[in-house]
Image (tube, rainbow, N blue to C red):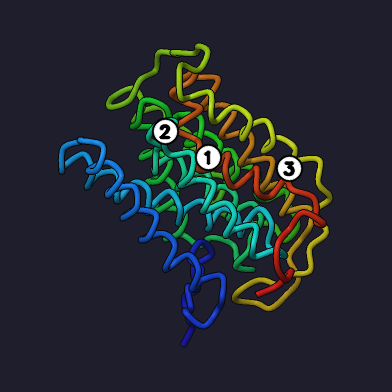
Amino acid sequence: MTTLRSGIGRDLSFRVPSNRFVLIAAPVAGVAWGIWKLATGHPFDHAVVRVFVAGGAAFLAWALGRELDPDRPWTAGLAAVLAAAILGAGIPSLWVAFAVLMAARVASRSTGVAPGPVDLAVLVGVSAGAGATDTGLGAGIVLGVVLLTDRWLPGGSHRLAPLAGVAAIAAAIAASAVWGSLTPAAGLPQGPEWVVVPVAVLGLGVVLRRATVRSAGDLTGEPLSAVRVRAGRVAAVAAGALCAAWAGGAGLTAGSVAWAALAASALPARASIGPGRD
């Protein structure tokens, strides 16, 4: 009997220190932001929304940090803390963050396994979800492009991946036309949105880091491809940059989770904290 293995799902065992960190830190970040909103006179429903957004942002930044810098688990932890810290600049889009995470995961192939047919169908839906937001069209398109071009990276891809890539791009555009916005709203950041700018500038430096990888795929135990890890970094930068170019300051803050993970991953090896492996 053949065991179906997902190419986009990763284990969250509580035995791994980095996993324990985020499973505690994400809820703490959410509760802390909720308490702060209540203490500063905001309505209860507003505080509740911030609880879920802050917790989700911290978790997704951590997960993206694992893809961008697989050899340094503390990069993921730093990404989580940074994503929660800059939340005051504006509410990030969790759809954008999830689409960027999936793009980086497919490109880096951190599971060791290519996305199968069910995975590909899910990823088309993720592209549509990102496109349905006012700021996430770029992230949805980048995810589609990653699927479309995956076959040319080491290890190839499922034969349906190019078709899924085309479908994902079309789904992102269609969802944007129906529920989001196909009208660019580019412009300079306003007020607190400027907080994200230095984080994004630092994050751009991730493409300059050498992708020397010692980690192995979750499901195969085979070494990850440095070429693929670099492709994941480029995809994440491209998604964040497109969102900012399309929607201006709102797009910049919508992608703040991705920029937090990119900034943490851009730090040189000597700036990392803690051991290099879980």
What residue is at 42 percent from the left and 61 percent from the top?
A: 118
Q: What residue did someone put label 1 on?
A: 144
User: Residue 272, how many percent across, how many down?
Assistant: 73, 58
Q: What residue did someone put label 2 on?
A: 172
Of labels 3 and 1, earlier in sequence is 1
User: Residue 225, how many percent across, how many down?
Assistant: 76, 61
The residue lying toward the viewer, choosing from 1 and 38, is 38
> Compared with residue 181, is residue 18 higher up or lower down, i.e. above or below?
below
Q: What residue did someone put label 3 on?
A: 206
Type of amino acid at the residue the image marks with label 2? Ala
Type of amino acid at the residue the image marks with label 1? Gly
| CB within 8 Å, label 3 to label 1 | no
> Compared with residue 248, is residue 51 higher up or lower down, i.e. above or below?
below
The residue lying toward the viewer, choosing from 121 and 272, is 272
The secondary element bearing badge 3 is classed as: helix
In the picture, residue 221 is in which quadrant? Answer: bottom right
